[in-house]
Structures are given as structure tokens and as C-alpha cells.
Amino acid sequence: MTLGEPVAEGHLTTSATPDPATGPVATPPLDRRPRRRWPLWTALVVVLLVAAGLAVPAGAVRGAESRTSAGVIARAENPTTRAARQIAARIAGQLDRQSAALLRDDRVGFLAIAERALHTDLRRRFATLRALRVSGWQARPKGLPTQAGRPGEWRLTVEFQYCFVVPDCRPSSVFVETRWRDGGAEPRLLELAKSEPDQYLPGLTMDQVGALPWEMSELVAVMGKRTLVATTPRFRKRLPELLTRAEAAAKVADQYVVVGDRPDLYRIYYAGPTEWKRWYGGELPDWAAGYTIGIGGGHREIVVKDDRYTPAGLDELLRHELAHAASLPDHDYWDESTWWLVEGLAEHAGADGRAISRYLGLSATQRLVDRGWDRKLDTVAPGEDTPDARVTGSYGIAYLAVRYLVDRFGEERVFAFVKAVLHDRRIPRQTSEDVLGVPWSTLHADCVKYIRGVVG
């Protein structure tokens, strides 16, 4: 399953993977004080002097402009805006101190900027971020704070940029609302909200993916060469097994990089029932067992739901989701018409070269082909309320279509087709003949014939 759009990089799109058990600052008031005409007189004097043939030092002109501009700004800015700028600068200093404390593993310093009532939540965040090997962390105000209603209290949107494990990664960002009290030597943090999906932020309009696992939950984690696996303390004992299976899946997923370099690290979260309904907004179809979500900065995170998987089912699910992280572009702009290609490629990774006869969803695929499929790849995507068996059949059709393309043209040319359609956003009929040498109408018919032949 794929789900998501990077923060501030597009809009949310959704699809899903079936369970392997059943198948695969306020505007200031107008300042009406009379204004002096100094900038205009300065300009006129310069023009007259030049017309008279008298030299005017450039530095003198720049100096006059600078002094005049600064004076106008200082007089134009009302007291509320000026106070907001000052408090924003002081909050930024507090955030810098907290960021430095996190990176040097100083919990006392991390808590020091906040009132005691917030310490429990901050202690949990600190421990979780350290468990996730936070390697980069920067917090900065976005826009100016606004008065929170009570004297001396301010609300401010803060952007947190972060990296895990890799020190010099391209950071992801999350925007949250905070509340501060200014009355002592330094501002004090009173409230730190959790990020919300599709929220409106002052001065910004962007889509967010919903509260992140490290915002919501206490996490423990283990790290391998290519993966970081995290879960809640309840499932701590499962971490060694999950890491072993994730590392094996990463070796397969690394072969599905379509453009650029492989992911610096695959980040996998194992979710219990509560976390499944809360992380990243939790709005998932009942039939989903896992998903991959873009979080910005070119990074994707994988969430797997705790369930009674067979070992083979869990391995296939991990290969599927990690292949999404390897193959998909930063910007998820495809629609349901190319769902078959997105999910078919991931199913192909999940199958990992085994015979088609061993594909777990083959019988459900046969039923769908026989009883309800309209013979169109661009309409095969399931909906949120689609019955489980039909969902499994839809994934099977997607898998067989991509399997046919790979068997006929080879992975290299199919990856070029995936790049053209998903990364370059060209529809199949615009690119099929250029990349694969066959018109899309003909190739689509060949795919359908192949699928019917396999399950017929």
C-alpha cells in the first residue's frame, strides 16, 4: 500500500495493501500619523546635483537610503508587531538550546525550556527520538507569534526539521502549534501540539500526513545495515525477528530503485491496534495490513499492522512495502488509473521471483476476472469499502499485468516505463510505444489476454 504526500510537497493520495492472511500574525491597524517626505527630498536633491554636474558619492546615497528606510520601517511597525518580532527571536533562542540538548543526549537541557506540566510528554519524546537515532534536529519559528488571549502568552507555529541515523540527510519537516509564556528571563513553553493532517497553519497552507509515531507513542527500536525497525514496548520481544525479516526484504527492495540512489535507510514501524488507528491519522480501509507514506525530504516510512501473519506472509508484506519506498517518486501525483502499475510492481517485489502458481492471491484473482472485472487496468483499484476477496483479486490483476511486462520486456525497460508514468507523469498511451515499442492499446489487450489465460 502507498499512502501519502510529502509535507509541503503535494496532496494526499491513498491506496493499500491487503492482509497477507486473507491475501496479499494579525494585520496591524492602519498608521494614520503624518509622514515626512524625506525619501522623496533625498531623491530630488540627488537628481538636481547630478543635473548640475556635481559628483555625489555613491556611499552617501546608499547611506541616506538606508537611514531613511530604517526610519520609515521603525515608525510604520506598530507596537504589537514589534513585540511579536522580539518574542519570536527569544523563542528561537530557546528552541536552539533545546535542539542542541537533544543532539547531545541531554534530557535535562531538553526539558529546561518548558513548564513542568509539559515534562512528562517531553520526556517521552526525548526517549523516543533518541531511540530512533535522531541525527539532525532544528526547530524554528514560522511567521510571527500571535497573542494567545492571556496577557504575556503567545501562540506560534514551529517547524521541526529532522533526520534519523544519517547525519547529513535531506531533512523531513513537521509543523506544529506551540504556546509560550513571556514574563521571566526567557519565554517558557506551555503547550506543544501534535501535527494534524491537512491542517491550516498561520501563513501557510499545506497538507500534512497526520501525527507521526514519535509524536504519539513511546517507541523502542533496533537498527540493521539497511533498516530501522521501531515499535511500542508491548512488542519489544518481536524486534529481533522483525529486524531479520526487514533486512532480508531490504535486499530485494534495493533492486527496485527506479530513479536515483536507493533510500538511505528503510524506516519501519510495527503498530499495535491502538497505534494503527492513531499514527498518520489512522484513516485506513479495514482490509489494509500495511502502508508506505511520504513524510517529506524524499523519505518514506512503512507501517505494518500487528496481525497473525505466516512467516511467508510477513516477508511478502515487507518486500511489498519496502519496494514502494524504493521505487516511488517524492511527489505522489498518480491517480487511480495507474494504481495497477504502482501496486503491481510492489506485488512483483513481494513475490520475489517465485512461480505464478504460488502467488497467494491467485484464486481470488480468478474469481474477480471471471465475475466482475471490466477488463480495464485503469479501473481495477479497490475502494475503502471493497470486500476483502475483491481487494485481493485487484492486487492479483495488478501483479499479473506487471509480471507479463517484465517477462516480455525485462526489468530494465519496465523500470523505464515506470519512470515515465509515475516519475515523469506521462500516461501509458503517451509513453508505451516510445519506451516499450508497442502502442498502449495493443499492449493493454495483450496484458488482459495474458491475465485471463493464467487464471482461466
Image (cartoon, helix red, strand yellow):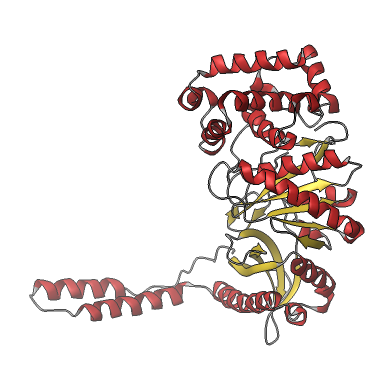
Q: Would residue 223 be visible to someone looking at this image? A: yes
Query: Looking at the image, which residue sits at the far bottom?
Result: 185
Q: Quadrant of residue 308?
A: top right
Give the quadrant of the N terminus.
top right
Given residues 177 and 279, the one toward you in this image is 279
Q: Quadrant of residue 59?
A: bottom left
At 66% from the left and 23% from the top, the residue drawn is 401
Task: Say left or right for 6 vs 72.
Answer: right
| Residue 273 point in image, percent of width and height | 89, 48
At 65% from the left and 21% from the top, the residue drawn is 377
Task: Say left or right for 261 vs 33.
Answer: right
Query: Looking at the image, which residue sits at the far left?
Result: 53
Task: Say left or right for 50 vs 197.
Answer: left
| Residue 233 point in image, percent of width and height | 89, 61
Residue 48 vs 426, above or below: the answer is below
Task: Say left or right for 134 vs 67.
Answer: right
At 83% from the left and 42% from the top, the residue drawn is 314
Q: How many marks?
A: 0
Give the quadrant of the C terminus.
top right
| Residue 336 point in image, percent of width and height | 65, 29
Given residues 334 and 46, the one toward you in this image is 334
| Residue 453 point in image, percent of width and height | 71, 13
